[in-house]
Every structure is written in C-alpha cells, then in structure tokens.
Image (cartoon, helix red, strand yellow):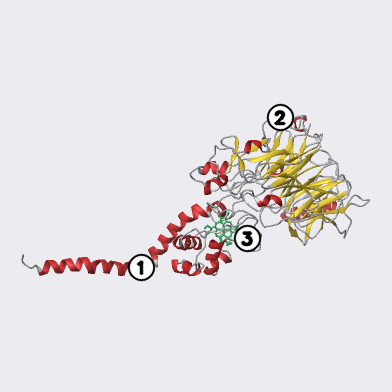
C-alpha cells in the first residue's frame, strides 16, 4: 500500500470517528465512567480509581454536587466574567462536557441545600433558588442573605456549611497572624484581649432565609479560630467540625525557641469539633506539634512550656504538621467506598508556603476514620497524593475543594490549574 | 640624639601617603565592582533572615499568598517606592495583575544599610538586573523624625 493511500485511509478513519463522536454527546456511554489508566496522575489506595472529569475550569475553590449530578464550582477569579461554573456530564462517561457560567462575584464557598444554591464572595453570602429543572435558571438574580463581613486582604475567604435546621455557618478569618499590635512585625507584642475576635477569628451562625444579615443578626458560634477553611456539618452526630490554619513565622520571630525545622512543623494545623460558645484558643494558644501540647504563643509570654489557661480552651481532636493548609473538610456519607470510610472525614490540604527554606509539604487529601461517637477512631492517613508533581516547591495542582457525588464517588478540585478529579471504588 | 632625615621621610611617606593612596583606590573601585558584590552578599543575609520565609529562596513567592520578586515593576522600578514598600509594608495591592492575600509587614526596624543591601541583592538576583540601592537613597526616603 502506498504511503498516500495509507494516509488517506487513516484520515478517513479519523474523520469517521470524529463525526461519530460529535453527534454523540447526549447518548449514554455504554460502559459508564471508567478511571483513567494512570488514575488521573494521582496516587490512590488499592481498589480506588481516579478520573480527570474537568480541566482548566478556572481557580476552582469549593465545589458541590447537586442531586442530578451537576457539579457547581466557585471560582476565586472571574473566568469569562463569571464566578460560578456549572458542569454537566451529558453522555454519562463521567467527564463533564457542558460548562455554564453565572454570577459576577469571586469567592470560595459553595453548597446546595433544600432547593437553593449558596455561594459566598469574600464579604457576602448569596443564594439562588433552583427551578423545577433542578438548576439555577438562566439570568437568575441571587438573594443576598449575608453582607458586610470583614475583608482585610488576609484570610478573607468566607467558606461555609449548613445544618439541617435552617442555619448557615460562615468562617470569618482573622486578618492577622497572631493579633500582634503590629501584624507580623518581629517583637511586636500580642494584644490582650485581642480586639479582632469581635468581628473575625471564628465561625458565625446566620439564618439561611433572612436577607441582608450582618454581625448584628448573626451569632458568634465559635471563636479563637485564626482561619477556618474547611468546615462541615456532620449529620451523623449533628455537630459542626472545622479545620484551622495555624499561625506562621514561629522560627522567623523566635529563632531562640524554635529550630528552622520546628518552625516548619509548628504549630499544628488542627481539627476541632465545635459547639455554640467554643473558644479554640487563637491568638493566645497554639498546639505545639513537637511537644504534643496546647501552649501559650510567645507573643503572649509563651516559652513552649507555659500553658497559661490553654488547658481550658477547646482542645482539637486531630493535629497535623504545620502549614499544610487544610482547605476543605467533608464527612463521607456515601455507600460506594469500603465500610471504614463511612462517616469518616476527608480533608483537602492545599499545601504549604511557610515552611521555607525547608521543602514545602501537603498538596494531598487525607482521610481520618471516625467512630459512631463522632470522634476519630484511628490515625489520619494520606488518601490521595501526587498533586504537586515533580517539584514539591512548585506544586502543579493544589487540592482545595471536596464534594460527594450522588453515587458516593468523591470529587477533588484544584485551584491552581482548575482540574477536577472523580475518585471511585470498584468492589 | 642625632637627626635622621631619611628615616623620618620614609616613615611619613608610609604613614600618610600610603593609606591615602589606598583610600583613593578603594573609593574609586568600591561603588563599582566589589561594592556591589559586598552589598549583595550582606543583602543575601538580610534576605534569608527577613524575606525568604514569604518570598522564597528563589524569589518566586507563593501563589496567591506572596508575590514573586522577579522582574516586577516594583522591584525594577522607582527606587523610592521600593524602599517605601520595605519600610512601610504593603497590603491589598495587585502585583502584575494578581491579588495576594497576605500582608507584608513594615520592615522599618532594618537599618538604612540593611535596606540598601537587601534591595541591592533583590535587584540583582533571581534574574533581575538593576542599579544598586544606596544608603543615601534609603536615608532620604526614611520619614523625618
């Protein structure tokens, strides 16, 4: 066969396949979703598969899957003028093949509950009513339910979660490292009492259905939390759980107390179970990962031993090494994964920046098994890894959001490249 | 005691002329070659202590937290503004079209020499190439007491 004829057949075959595919978008794929041969470039425990279901979506922060399988993503930067993206899989192969953008605000928080989609900017929370087709209608205008929250260019994201009683819990991160008189200035003392705690450094509770609520209408539900990015209502025990980003720069400010390595691992990133009135200790206390104890921050007279009244603060239920940045928390209620995962917690770690000059770390998704009592029943373990790629100091992908699919699969979003993976388990 | 004019003359020459000559040569070459290098070397120490934690070893910064110090208009641009950033800190300002959600604290506790050195280091590292920052320029930018 001549080389020309060969190319011709080849070209025809390609065209045929292409046209077959083009007319095929609504047809349900016969085999359903299958994991990518390389699990989408990430490492997973045996039996689990990973599939890249969307790419280059934008800076995807938190995500949520609607009961019809649509995935909604909140963007931190507008893409084509839109801050929310709806992804739909029209042919059942698992990959999203339709993208619709709406909403003109940037932000992080995203959830759907009882027929409404909730999304946050860095100062407000909005909600959209889903229509009879179970989607946000074209051109829908959202209702502003919360407004006027602090945004001082530090820890300004406003992630949230909802309970089953008509309440929404919104993070207001402290625009500060450790409430010093002069933020992040070596030697500047800690303010006591810390005035920031009146308006930030905690989780506030609002009603889901009242317009224009602000501080006056909200309840400071839990305080002493520097910056909570992951929060979820654990329906198994009807309780709020949060993951906190701990303070920075212990080694830089107190080299006489912390080695460079200790500064990279301290303080712990912590997970708390909080109730109304919980005080988790920031800025006065931190959890020393090396000493395994909650002690006073050096800005408040701490010497790594003195505990002050840190013993009376809410104690965390899981402690991780420092600076790994737990950006989302999800209690798994699905049936697809093995029994041990049921009601356990997945945590997406965005990865560190403030371990330098030690190598950076994190950029993984962790699992913490939980017992029926709503407390951890074992050690945390890395569930999905390899997002950073070849150079840990120049991470390619950074896990930021988690969502549970209608079939019990797990979605992981990345806000660096805008990639979304779907994790499944084959029995 | 007898006068020894030649010995005295020699002493005078070595005690006065030689150091003067030295000073002259040094004053001429320091600000150019070795001056830049010395300032950069001192600046690296300041950088590693006070800046590296946020802007990283390679000046690359941390995505969306701390901006890079590589060929930005702040690093290569107006020195007075640049000195001002180190002295007064910076927050809520876009760098090369990106927002950074961390706060750079004022570093006015650094001496004029340290600020000149660290900025000379930054302006001549990480792929940057720009003129040195002098102590006099820092002094002029510091708010009068």
- Discs 2 and 1 carry the same chain letter: no
User: Does A305 sit left or right of A223 as displayed?
Assistant: left
Chain letter of mark 3 equals B
Q: Indicate which label's residue lies in the foreground, 1 or 3.
A: 3
Residue drawn at point x = 75 percent, y = 34 percent:
A344
Q: Position of residue A193 (x, y in %)?
A: 64, 48
For marks 2 and 1, give the one nearer the viewer.
Answer: 2
Which mark is drawn over residue B29? 1
Q: Secondary structure at mark 1?
A: helix
Judge whether A210 appears above or below A240 on screen. Answer: below
Alpha carbon of mark 2 to alpha carbon of mark 3: how far? 43 Å
Disc number for residue B91:
3
In this view, the residue in front, B60 or A149, is: A149
Occupied quadrant, residue A81: bottom right
Instruction: Provide the chain ID for the residue under circle 2.
Output: A
Q: CA distance from mark 2 to mark 1?
A: 69 Å
Label 1 chain ID: B
Q: Can you identify the residue that label 2 sits on?
A: A377
| Crowd tier of the residue under label 3, counting other residues whose Cα lies within 10 Å: few below 14, some 14–19, many 20 or above | some
């Amino acid at each position: 066969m001549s080389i020309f004829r060969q190319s011709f057949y080849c070209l025809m075959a390609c065209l045929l396949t292409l046209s077959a595919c083009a007319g095929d978008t609504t047809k349900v794929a016969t085999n359903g979703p299958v994991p990518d041969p390389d699990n989408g470039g990430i490492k997973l425990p045996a039996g689990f598969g990973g599939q890249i279901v969307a790419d280059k979506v934008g800076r995807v922060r938190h995500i949520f899957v609607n009961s019809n399988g649509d995935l909604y993503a909140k963007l931190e930067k507008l893409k084509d003028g839109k801050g929310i993206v709806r992804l739909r899989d029209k042919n059942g192969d698992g990959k999203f093949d339709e993208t619709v953008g709406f909403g003109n605000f940037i932000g992080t928080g995203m959830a759907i509950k009882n027929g409404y989609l909730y999304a946050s900017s860095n100062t407000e929370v909005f909600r959209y009513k889903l229509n009879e087709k179970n989607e946000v209608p074209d051109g829908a205008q959202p209702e502003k339910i919360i407004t006027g929250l602090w945004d001082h260019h530090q820890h300004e994201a406003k992630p949230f979660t909802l309970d089953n009683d008509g309440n929404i819990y919104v993070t207001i991160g402290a625009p500060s490292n450790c409430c010093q008189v002069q933020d992040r200035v070596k030697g500047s003392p800690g303010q006591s009492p810390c005035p920031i705690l009146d308006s930030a450094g905690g989780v506030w509770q609002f009603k889901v259905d009242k317009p224009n609520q602000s501080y006056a209408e909200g309840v400071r539900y839990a305080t002493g939390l520097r910056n909570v990015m992951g929060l979820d209502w654990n329906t198994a025990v009807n309780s709020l759980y949060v993951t906190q980003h701990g303070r920075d720069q212990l080694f830089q400010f107190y080299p006489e107390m912390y080695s460079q390595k200790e500064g990279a691992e301290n303080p712990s990133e912590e997970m708390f179970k909080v109730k109304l009135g919980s005080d988790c200790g920031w800025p006065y206390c931190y959890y020393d990962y090396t000493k395994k104890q909650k002690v006073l921050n050096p800005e408040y007279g701490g010497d790594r031993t003195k505990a002050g009244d840190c013993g009376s603060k809410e104690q965390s239920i899981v402690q991780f090494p420092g600076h790994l940045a737990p950006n989302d928390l999800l209690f798994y209620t699905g049936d697809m994964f093995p029994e041990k995962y049921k009601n356990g917690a997945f945590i997406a770690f965005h990865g560190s920046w403030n371990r330098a000059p030690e190598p950076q770390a994190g950029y993984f998704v962790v699992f913490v098994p939980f017992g029926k009592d709503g407390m951890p029943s074992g050690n945390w373990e890395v569930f999905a890894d390899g997002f950073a790629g070849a150079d840990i100091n120049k991470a390619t992908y950074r896990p930021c959001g988690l969502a549970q699919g209608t079939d019990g699969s797990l979605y992981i979003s990345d806000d660096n490249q805008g990639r979304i993976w779907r994790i499944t388990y084959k029995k | 005691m007898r006068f020894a004019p030649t010995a005295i003359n020699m002493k005078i020459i070595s005690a006065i002329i030689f150091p003067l000559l030295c000073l002259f040569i040094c004053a001429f070459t320091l600000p150019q070659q070795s001056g830049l290098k010395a300032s950069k070397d001192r600046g690296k120490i300041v950088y590693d202590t006070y800046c590296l934690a946020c802007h990283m070893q390679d000046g690359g910064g941390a995505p969306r937290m701390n901006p890079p110090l590589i060929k930005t208009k702040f690093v290569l641009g107006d020195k007075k503004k640049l000195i001002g950033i180190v002295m007064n800190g910076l927050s809520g300002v876009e760098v090369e079209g990106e927002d950074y959600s961390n706060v750079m604290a004022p570093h006015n506790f650094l001496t004029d020499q340290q600020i000149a050195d660290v900025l000379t280091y930054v302006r001549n590292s990480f792929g940057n190439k720009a003129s040195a920052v002098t102590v006099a320029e820092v002094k002029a930018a510091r708010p009068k007491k």
